[in-house]
Image: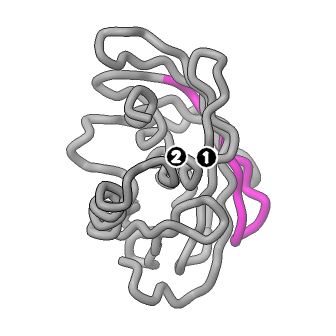
Amino acid sequence: MLRFAPFAFVLVGYISLSAHAQSIEPGLWEMSSPNMAISGQNLPDMQSLLAQVPAEQRAMMEQMLQQNGINLGQNGGIQVCITPQQIAKSEIPLNDPESGCQQQVTERSAKRWKFNFSCPQGKGQGEVQFISRKEFSTEVRGQFSHQGMAQNGTMKTHARWVKADCGNSK
């Protein structure tokens, strides 16, 4: 799990950041990434990975995610609250401001955005397809270095709006 975790979390952050300005609905969103691959090897989804982690360690990981406004969803994804203020200010909870990552939108239309990203340990490109104000999908491709090894990765994500009330999610 540890060898691809940095890539997966960076990409999830960029997916959310890319979507914010396309007039998406504020509220509780669930994002799932059932299609991830590192160097051509398919990876299990987040829920499958966490099922293999000892209960005490899983609880610590879930608590860390919750402190950042992220809850595990019911359908193998993560849930995050996106407020109107966050959408207006580009303050999406999954984008760690200390990550050193930057993004540039290279092509923008009402239904599709293309972007490049660069981080201290990786870079790549992606595309966001806006299906509606309550749904979007992404495909991201990148190259990154983990423990001194260069790797390629891909991830497809589906995001859907759950409800306006975020409940106990940040």
User: For residue 67: magenta?
Assistant: no
Which one is in front, 102 or 43? Answer: 43
State the residue at coordinates (39%, 22%).
122
Measured as percent of width and height from the top left, residue 135 is found at 72, 64
- Magenta residue span: 124-138
Q: Quadrant of residue 154?
A: top right
State the residue at coordinates (59%, 67%).
30
Q: In which quarter of the image is residue 155?
A: top right
- Disc 2 target residue: 49
Q: Considering the numbered disc 2 on the image, is that residue within a helix, a strand or a loop? A: helix
Which one is in front, 70 or 89? Answer: 70
Q: In this view, does 55 lie to the left or right of 156?
A: left
Query: Is residue 31 something that shows in the picture?
Result: yes
State the residue at coordinates (60%, 76%).
25
Amino acid type shown at disc 1: Asp
Which one is in front, 58 or 166? Answer: 58
Measured as percent of width and height from the top left, residue 21 is found at 54, 60
Q: In this view, does 62 lie to the left or right of 141?
A: left
State the residue at coordinates (56%, 55%).
47
Q: Quadrant for the N terminus, please.
A: top left
Measured as percent of width and height from the top left, residue 123 is found at 44, 22
Rendered view: 81 above or below 76: below
Badges 1 and 2: C-beta atoms under 8 Å apart?
yes
Q: Distance between the residues labelled 1 and 2?
A: 6 Å
- Disc 1 target residue: 45
